[in-house]
Image (cartoon, rainbow, N blue to C red):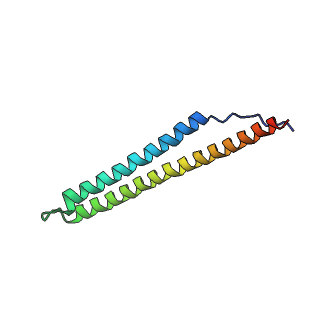
Amino acid sequence: MTQPKAVAYDFAAASDLSAKCRQLHDKIAWLVRVRASGVATYLNDRPDSWTGGKREAFDGDHGREQRALDSLAHQALTLMAHVDTATENATAMARKILFADSDK
């Protein structure tokens, strides 16, 4: 059986990906807040607010879209956590190798 090929962990790429995931989460969360604020301002907080079947359909669609965006933001954080964990593991492995070589 052949030994697996050694793979170098790209710490810079991992750091960049983690930062981009955080940025994606923050932008999606901002969009969710802006959309919710807009609906509250233009539809819910007015005495002459839009009502009826089309409004109910809009509210249903808007709610589904908000939940989808929330889910996407959560997935960005989950991916960021996986990248950060992989980086921590790679760092620990690199230290272990470094200290094992210095003991020789």
**What residue occupies the far left of the structure in this picture?**
48
**Labels in figure, total:** 0
Q: Nearer the viewer, residue 63 or 11?
A: 11
**What residue occupies the far front of the structure in this picture?**
103
Image-based side of 6 in relation to 88, left or right: right
Image-based side of 65 in relation to 104, left or right: left
Percent x, y for residue 15?
55, 38
Q: Nearer the viewer, residue 89 or 103?
A: 103
Percent x, y for residue 66?
36, 56
Quarter of the image that includes the N terminus:
top right
Quarter of the image that includes the C terminus:
top right
Residue 64 falls in image quadrant: bottom left
Residue at 44% across / 51% down in the picture? 73
Residue at 53% across / 42% down in the picture? 18
Image-based side of 23 in relation to 57, left or right: right
Q: Is residue 104 above or below residue 53?
A: above
Percent x, y for residue 98?
75, 37
Residue at 41% across / 47% down in the picture? 26
Q: Is residue 80 above or below residue 5?
A: below
